[in-house]
Amino acid sequence: MRRWLTRAKHIGLALLVLLWVGPAAAQGIESVLNPGKVIEGHAKLEDDCKQCHIRFDRNAQDRLCMACHEKVGQDVRDKTGLHGRQKPQACRSCHTDHKGRTAKIAEFDKQRFDHAVTDFALRGKHIKAECTACHEPTRKYREAPLECNACHRKDDVHKGSLGTKCADCHTEANWKEAKFDHGKTRFALTGKHIDTACADCHKDKNYKETPRACVACHKRADDTKGHKGQFGDKCESCHGTKSWKGSSFNHDTETKYALRGKHRSAECTDCHTGPLYKTKLASDCFSCHKADDKHKGSLGKECGSCHTELGWKQKSKFDHAKTSFPLLGKHIEAECKACHQSAMFKEAPKECVGCHKKDDKHEATLGTQCGDCHTEKNWKTTTGRFDHDRTQFKLRNAHALPAVKCSACHQSLSSFRKTPLDCYSCHKKDDKHEGQQGTKCEQCHTDKSWKVANFDHARTRFPLTGKHLVATCKSCHTTPRYKDAKSDCYSCHRKEDKHQLRLGVQCESCHSTRDWVSWTFDHNQRSAYKLDGAHAKVACEACHTQPAPRGKHIASLGASCISCHRRDDPHDGNFGMRCEQCHVPQSWKRITNRMSMSQPTRGLQ
């Protein structure tokens, strides 16, 4: 306790001496107060305290540290690395100096170190790995590589043929266990291929030269149990990856002979008896059904005149096209009894509603003229039939068919007439503004494109002028909640504030929307301190060095000369602080004697 009091007295005495003798002897006093030798790396700075310390500003030490240790400072600013990810704290809390030349001020407990606060969190096998496995003794910890290949090049059995992005297939849990996404290759795995072992297709480690043709892997199956090459080597034409035994070949779309009726259940080899791509197969009935011709050719070879694919014994002689109701679309496939309920065929109704009354989802609210909207091709399809211009809502631009389906607006088939006409009823889910702009979408949007807006910004609380007229909406409106956009300059122009808040956030005091670079501020009219002489040419930041207080334009400055020119006072305060008695604003070196020589100055007293 006594030693502490003695040291405190010495410090107090030193401070009194410092105040008396002035800045000239400050360095000597600081040497007296030096708490101890610095480490070897800082030895060259030991006699120049201001390199690491700023008087009466303890927090400034961190800025000076990071000014020298640039990479650490960059990590802190970018929030990367150990120093950028951990909770902000003073440098001296971990790296305290003045403990001697050999002191280790960057040591840490390797066993308890949390690697998660670095750019490389340890997972899987990495958790149990030794530090020296990745961190070489001669290199700094921050210089350890982050790429897998840097450490595992010797484990690459592919010898670089698959590149260096090991993480695309391997994980930290087990190097030998792969999780490769085959969907990113030219051969996406589907069906049975998903469960197939890699080695079944990749016989060696050269993955890129693996063939993609089916026959390359399945030729043996085709030779022993399949077609034995009869249908060629384009297996994918008939087979899919779900099952080799099934056939997905669509004869209706892939050939000129659509399979109908009994033909659909026939085996391929019933008709294709020879090589598929060498023997051209006839498409007439008689070529295949000659043995079924009970007429023995007496009625010719046009079997289709009477018979159909539904059944050889079923006949269809009647030509409905010769009646007043030709069969079209789905009517062709309909059975006769579907329309002809009695033997009096002429009594069959010709109106749609006569047969389709039960199919009327509108419950007769749209009348009985079904043909205005529906066709014989498909009862559910109405595209191109109904004239929407006859309604109160004409379809234009993006609303026009077939871009929009009827069901998009008409949610209920039985109440077409009750469909709302306002935009919001249909486009509520498209409202990115979350209701903030109201429900009158047409004020900004048109039916040409929902994404294109025609908005008059002059009707808002922030009319656009100057450079704001050519700015993009997203420059200020970072989210679709437009009313959340700030109306003050600083919110958008923060990065353009060259004054670093020293002149406050009321940018409009000097700047205008015409051009950010140009500015006007009449210091003589708008402040209590008129600028004259050399002051008129001085930059604003020369006097306004501190950030402005919250809610104010600039920080309050003293009106006396000494407030700014203390360091220019060669008299060390001996002549007082009223510099204007001798000096003039035109030039600091120009001196005029305004004070009576009979009156002593404060400094001389």
Image (tube, grey):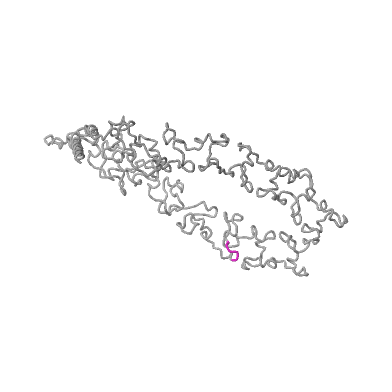
| Quadrant assignment for the N terminus | top left
Residue at image point 44% right, 41% down: 119
Residue occupying the point 81% across, 59% down: 306
The picture places residue 563, in percent across and down from the top left corner, at 24, 40
Say which quarter of the image contains residue 535: top left
Residue for point 53% across, 53% down: 450
Q: Is residue 462 above or below residue 119?
A: below
**Which contiguous range is marked in magenta?**
410-414
In the rendered view, tell whether residue 388 sits above or below residue 156. below
Which residue extends farthest top? 44
Instruction: Using the image as rendered, state which of residue 328 and residue 289 is in the foreground.
Output: 289
Report the front residue among 581 and 7: 7
Q: Please, which residue is most extreme toward the left here?
A: 598
Magenta segment main secondary structure? loop
Residue 133 visible somewhere in the drawing? yes
Residue 325: percent from left, percent from top: 75, 63
Residue 398, image x, y percentages: 57, 54
Total residue callouts: 0
**Is 563 on the left-hand or right-hand side of 410?**
left
In the foreground, 261 or 380: 261
Q: What quarter of the picture does the C terminus occupy?
A: top left
Where is residue 100, by image quadrant? top left
Residue 448 among those drawn in magenta: no
Residue 461 in the figure: left or right of residue 363? left
Residue 329 screen position, x and y as percent: 71, 59
> Viewer-proximal residue, 267 or 221?
221
> Is residue 578 in sight in this rendering?
no
412 left or right of 544 in image: right
